[in-house]
Image (cartoon, grey):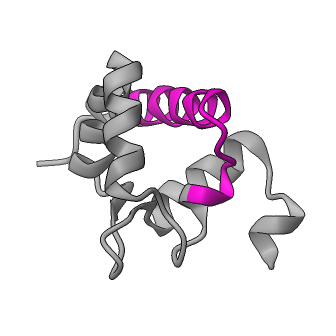
Amino acid sequence: MPPDTSTAAHVQRSLRQCLSTVAELLYNHGHVLETVTLPHRGLARRDLSALKTSASEWATCQQVLEASEAATFNEYGRFVLTRMGRELMFDMFGEGAADCA
């Protein structure tokens, strides 16, 4: 059975909405996109906790990103985007010089 294209479109729209929200919340809380786009960086658990406490939409977005495999925890236990999540983020916002370093 072929995948339901309306479901796929909805999932991608949800991912893009969450990535946009994540970018805004990171900025509002003193972080930069590279915090989650560079695989060796990531958000520490205390930063995630602070974001969840101060921004109710963070928890939902984090859940959507993890469930869709657009985000995960790296080997240091920090929250980062996966390759797919980074590609969507760069598609939406462009790839900055720091992302290439």
Residue at the outermost right position: 97
Residue 13's place in the image compared with 92, above or below, is above
Residue 36's place in the image compared with 78, above or below, is above
Residue 9 visible in image: no
The quarter holding residue 74 reads: bottom left
For the image shown, how many numbered marks are present on the structure? 0
The residue sitting at 59% across, 37% down in the picture is 26
Residue 83: image location, x then y, percent: 49, 68
Q: Which residues are magenta?
A: 12-35
- Is residue 59 magenta-colored? no
- Is residue 23 magenta-colored? yes
Query: Residue 7 versus residue 71: which sits nearer the camera?
Result: 71
Query: Residue 52 versus residue 84: which sits nearer the camera?
Result: 52
Residue 89: image location, x then y, percent: 61, 48
Residue 26 visible in image: yes
Query: Residue 16 versus residue 39: which sits nearer the camera?
Result: 39
Residue 49: image location, x then y, percent: 31, 40
The quarter holding residue 24 reads: top right
- Apparent side of residue 1 relative to residue 69 in the rendered image (left or right): left
Quarter of the image that includes the C terminus: bottom right
The residue sitting at 67% across, 59% down in the picture is 34
The residue sitting at 41% across, 33% down in the picture is 51
Residue 97: image location, x then y, percent: 88, 66
